[in-house]
Image (tube, rainbow, N blue to C red):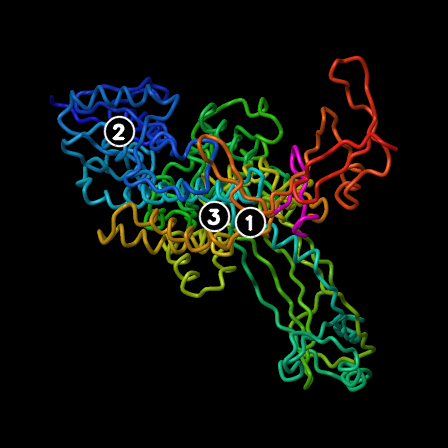
């Protein structure tokens, strides 16, 4: 045995390693067998946690509240269905090589993806870790010159494992508990539930918005040099007092009287401002831009970028959190952009001596990923559909902008002061478009009158007090929702937990106390839509009635982003070797036990049909019956028996006939139907008959009344 088995996280990385060392094709079949290395890969996670019922049948359907919470010490695993081939290749070669090189991505998930495979197959040999920043051949070879001991990184894998176990335990426990209590299948998740909360809260704020009037003042000044100009007043803090804005027009009347017809000295200052190009896209930024500009969902953007990357080799890795690039990218940019700009039919001249702040090895994300840019490849751009063209063009032009001068504006700012405030106006004039010439839609022309620098005596011709109304927040779009998912810490009230969320992302340039990842946020949104909790209305993302009802009955301690923060604090202990991987799962149990006796009491997601004639609780509309909401059931001897509640239950189908709502409401309120109900079938099949119905108010049992 003289070779090392290199295990990458995904096939494209394995092929990039093969290309770097052996010049193999970018679509080479795995494994790649060379003189020193056998190179193969996983395909993301190829090992998964087993279902709870495979550990203990008490967790199998039908579910039972008494079996909750779900806690499985050192949760067992299995090979993911459909990924057996990847596992078989690794298993075979582990017995043939002298050691392993772990080539997973540099983040927690990348660490556990390979670690869990080695653990599953019980590998006890030497394992080295390679830290690959990107898939460029030069960087790959350099990384292999600096192999590390994998033991120094195993703590990252343990953190990811602990989180995945806890997510499974939390989702399965809380979803089953809520379903059994609410009488309707529902889903709870550490990320999906606070995401739903963002949307429900935003919609509630919009619905409950009360328009508030406020007032602003404009002053029109005159001078022979420019004619007439309008300036807006910004009140001084002393003038506003404790207010954030003026809500009484009388407050401005005295200022208006003092300023109107007065002489003032208008001071104008000229300056030059520059606007540098934005950094290359990271995945969330691309999703936000495509949502705003073209109405694409994040799933559409993901699918398009996957095709561009995998089928056409047109762009680099797409699900990245980084906007930065390496020095090697800078060296190759002229060739890469030569191909990419030709693909889209753009002949803009670029200056490859310009080096934007995007090119910074030190700023690359810890997972080794970099910003999304085009690859040096030629393909049939015209054959792409319109949406795919928009995405590829955006990625290419954003990269090209790094090699263009900043846009330059001339700025003229005019103002005069009174005791109450500052009256000012600003005019910006684009004098050199620079990189903005790639995006002509952003080259907005300011048509206001230009005033040159200096002082002029002006007369205030008139002042106008303008009435304004406060506007509600705007509904979420997919782009703005993703933006809030990356910075949800700002909504967390507990300072300690807010700081924990921010600390979690302190090494990221684009995450500010987040939930989810670039790879999962689109899936969370799609899951909430599939569950019926939210819906798309054009570009908007809105909550449904079911989503609002469900979120509002959830226990407070599992509704927000607090759990992610608490789990992060425990993950730090795991990373430091102060706790085992089950610590977060144990906290799931503690959280569940803290609310299991007080949650969902008297709550239901079913339509309220009326009042129980037995105990006066709500009667809810279920699939087969109208039932008192106090009823609770438990599994016993393979079946379901009532555990609590008054027991009232009016079945929708009696004596072979389905009752309509009118019949049911009359029984519920009066205890009997006032008229005969027709359509009951005779047992011998010879016809039908009619009868009045009476109902036992205690149980809901129906009897037939044949007399008039």
Secondary structure type for disc 2: strand
Q: Confirm whether residue 282 shows in the render.
A: yes
**Within-10-Å neighbours for mark 1: few <14, some 14–19, many 20+:** some
Q: Residue at x 71, y 79 (%)?
A: 456
Q: Residue at x 86, y 35 (%)?
A: 675
Q: Residue at x 75, y 43 (%)?
A: 668
Of the two numbered discs 3 and 2 in the rendering, the one whose residue sits closer to the viewer: 2
Specify the quadrant of the image occupied by residue 461: bottom right
Mark 2–mark 1 Cα distance, whole angstroms, equals 45 Å
User: Furthest residue to the front?
Assistant: 707
Indicate yes or no whether the magenta region holds residue 618: yes
Q: Which residue is labeled 2 in the image?
A: 7
Q: How many marks?
A: 3
From the viewer's perspective, is 385 left or right of 194? right
- What is the x, y in percent for residue 600? 55, 50
Among numbered discs 3 and 1, the one appearing first in the sequence: 3
| Mark drawn on residue 261 | none
From the viewer's perspective, is 81 left or right of 267? left
Among numbered discs 2 and 1, the one appearing first in the sequence: 2
Q: Is residue 159 above or below residue 461?
A: above
Q: Which residue is labeled 3 in the image?
A: 279
Q: Which residue is labeled 1 in the image?
A: 434
Specify the quadrant of the image occupied by residue 82: top left
State yes or no: discs 2 and 1 in contact (Cβ < 8 Å): no
Q: Nearer the viewer, residue 213 or 668?
A: 668
* Quadrant in which the N terminus appears: top left
Write the start and end of the magenta stretch as one range.
613-629
Mark 3–mark 2 Cα distance, whole angstroms, equals 32 Å
Specify the quadrant of the image occupied by residue 525: top right
């Amino acid at each position: 045995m003289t070779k090392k088995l290199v295990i990458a996280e995904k096939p494209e990385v394995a092929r990039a390693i093969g290309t770097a060392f052996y010049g193999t094709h970018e679509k080479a079949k795995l494994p790649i067998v060379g003189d020193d290395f056998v190179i193969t890969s996983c395909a993301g996670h190829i090992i998964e946690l087993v279902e709870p019922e495979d550990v203990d049948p008490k967790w199998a359907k039908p579910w039972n509240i008494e079996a909750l919470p779900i806690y499985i010490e050192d949760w067992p695993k299995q090979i993911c269905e459909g990924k057996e081939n990847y596992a078989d290749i690794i298993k075979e070669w582990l017995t043939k090589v002298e050691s392993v090189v772990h080539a997973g991505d540099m983040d927690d998930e990348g660490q556990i993806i390979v670690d869990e495979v080695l653990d599953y197959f019980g590998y006890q040999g030497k394992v080295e870790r390679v830290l690959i920043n990107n898939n460029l051949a030069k960087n790959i070879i350099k990384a292999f010159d600096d192999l590390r001991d994998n033991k120094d990184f195993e703590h990252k894998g343990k953190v990811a494992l602990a989180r995945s176990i806890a997510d499974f335990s939390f989702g399965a426990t809380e979803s089953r508990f809520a379903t059994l209590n609410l009488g309707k299948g529902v889903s709870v998740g550490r990320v999906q539930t606070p995401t739903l909360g963002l949307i429900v809260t935003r919609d509630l704020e919009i619905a409950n918005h009360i328009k508030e009037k406020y007032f602003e003042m404009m002053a029109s000044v005159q001078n022979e040099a420019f004619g007439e100009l309008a300036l807006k007043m910004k009140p001084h803090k002393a003038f506003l007092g404790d207010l954030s804005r003026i809500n009484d027009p009388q407050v401005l009347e005295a200022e208006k009287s003092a300023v109107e017809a007065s002489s003032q000295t208008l001071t104008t200052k000229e300056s030059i401002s520059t606007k540098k190009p934005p950094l290359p896209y990271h995945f969330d930024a691309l999703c936000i831009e495509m949502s705003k500009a073209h109405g694409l969902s994040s799933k559409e953007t993901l699918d398009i970028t996957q095709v561009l990357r995998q089928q056409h080799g047109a762009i680099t890795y797409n699900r990245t959190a980084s906007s930065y690039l390496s020095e090697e990218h800078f060296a190759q940019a002229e060739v890469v952009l030569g191909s990419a700009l030709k693909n889209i039919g753009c002949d803009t001249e670029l200056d490859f001596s310009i080096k934007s702040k995007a090119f910074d090895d030190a700023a690359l994300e810890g997972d080794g990923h970099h910003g999304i840019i085009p690859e040096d490849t030629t393909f049939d751009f015209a054959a792409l559909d319109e949406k795919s063209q928009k995405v590829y063009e955006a990625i290419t032009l954003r990269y090209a902008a790094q090699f263009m001068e900043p846009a330059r504006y001339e700025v003229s700012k005019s103002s005069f002061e009174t005791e109450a405030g500052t009256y000012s106006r600003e005019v910006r004039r684009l004098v050199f478009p620079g990189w903005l010439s790639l995006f002509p839609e952003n080259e907005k022309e300011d048509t206001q009158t230009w005033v040159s620098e200096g002082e002029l005596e002006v007369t205030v011709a008139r002042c106008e007090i303008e009435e304004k109304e406060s506007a509600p927040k705007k509904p979420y779009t997919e782009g703005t929702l993703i933006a809030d998912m990356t910075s949800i810490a700002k909504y967390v009230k507990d300072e300690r937990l807010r700081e924990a969320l921010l600390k979690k992302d302190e090494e990221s340039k684009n995450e500010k106390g987040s939930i989810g990842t670039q790879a999962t946020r689109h899936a969370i949104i799609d899951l909430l839509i599939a569950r019926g909790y939210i819906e798309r209305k054009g570009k908007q993302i809105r909550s449904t009635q079911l989503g609002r009802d469900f979120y509002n009955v959830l226990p407070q301690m599992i509704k927000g982003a607090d759990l992610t923060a608490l789990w992060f604090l425990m993950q730090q202990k795991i990373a430091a070797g102060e706790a085992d991987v089950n610590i977060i799962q144990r906290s799931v149990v503690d959280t569940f036990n803290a609310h299991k006796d007080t949650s969902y009491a008297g709550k239901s997601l079913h339509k309220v049909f009326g009042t129980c004639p037995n105990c006066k609780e709500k009667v809810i509309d279920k699939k087969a019956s109208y039932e008192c909401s106090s009823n609770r059931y438990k599994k016993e001897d393979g079946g379901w028996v009532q555990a609590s509640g008054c027991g009232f239950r009016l079945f929708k189908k009696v004596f072979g006939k389905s009752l309509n709502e009118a019949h049911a409401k009359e029984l519920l309120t009066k205890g009997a139907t006032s008229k005969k109900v027709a359509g009951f079938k005779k047992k011998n099949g010879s016809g039908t008959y009619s009868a009045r119905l009476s109902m036992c108010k205690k149980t809901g049992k129906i009897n037939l009344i044949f007399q008039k």
